Amino acid sequence: MKTIFFCAAIMFSVFNTFAQAEAEAETFVESGIEKYEIDDIDGAIADFSKAISLDKSHTIAYYFRGVCKATKDETAGIEDFDQTILLDPAYADAYNYRGIVKSARDDEQGALKDFNKAISLDGTQSSYYLNRADTKILLKDFRGALADCNQAIPLGIEDMEAFAYRARGEAKLELGDFKGAIADFNKSIQADPNDMGLYILRGNAKDQLDDRKGACADWQKANSMGADLGNEGCE
């Protein structure tokens, strides 16, 4: 009987230790998220690492540590996203962010697979479609990129207007819809007037419509922002 009580006491002690470690891990995760939100990235990484040392199955800790690492270096964090997915294969955001990192590493096919998976898990996130569209543009799949942009925009693109309309404008430009491209570049410039590349792209679209004056105005605007396009054919 004493042996039974002794074993039960050990089991209770072990369980209590695990429960305490999990609670401490959760505290560090909450602290890490708070630090991430105020751009204390190094502090956040330290907290997420502490959480993982206490609870190696804490999915959110791995995910946010990966996000923080990628914030510091766009090619970093992939191992944490791998671990997140290993622990939770249905974590759509982890596939999306891993795709972003793979794209930064020039692994466009790997990125495409991850964006496809994220969308299959949650087809309501406009950012997933826009990230896939951006990847498809790099892979010269302009019709696919256009379709993804058209899917994303009705879902809501708050804080992503410049990205969304630029991507759709690029796809339209490559597909020969120059008027449509200009309309999208106009919207993108309205959202982000400091993006030099947008003026170059809009100038290219105007040039295709023989609007040389308008094209030159955009190219000269880009030059004033730091581009080095020259003035060939422009007064």
Image (tube, rainbow, N blue to C red):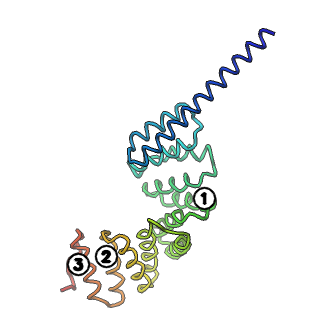
| Whole-percent x, y for residue 154 in the image | 55, 73
Residue reaching furthest to the top: 2
Q: In this view, does 59 lie above or below 154?
A: above
Q: Mark 1 points at which residue?
A: 117
Amino acid residing under circle 1:
Lys
Asked whether, in this view, residue 12 is left or right of residue 218, the answer is right
Q: Residue at x 26, y 88 (%)?
A: 213
First along the sequence among labels 2 and 3: 2
How far is mark 2 from mark 3, CA to CA?
A: 9 Å
On the rendered image, what quadrant is the N terminus found in? top right
Q: Mark 2 points at which residue?
A: 199
Q: Is residue 66 above or below residue 178?
A: above
Residue reaching furthest to the left: 235
Image depth: mark 2 or mark 1 in front: 2
Tag count: 3
Q: What element carries label 3?
A: helix
| Whole-percent x, y for residue 233 in the image | 22, 85
How far is mark 2 from mark 1, CA to CA?
A: 34 Å
Crowding near the residue tagged with mark 3, few <14, some 14–19, many ≥20 C-alpha atoms within 10 Å: many
Residue reaching furthest to the bottom: 210
Q: Name the residue under label 3.
A: 220
The quarter of the displayed image where residue 160 is located: bottom left
Asked whether, in this view, residue 112 is left or right of residue 229, the answer is right
Amino acid residing under circle 3:
Gln
Q: Residue at x 44, y 74 (%)?
A: 165
The quarter of the displayed image where residue 161 is located: bottom left
Q: Is mark 2 on a helix, strand or loop?
A: helix
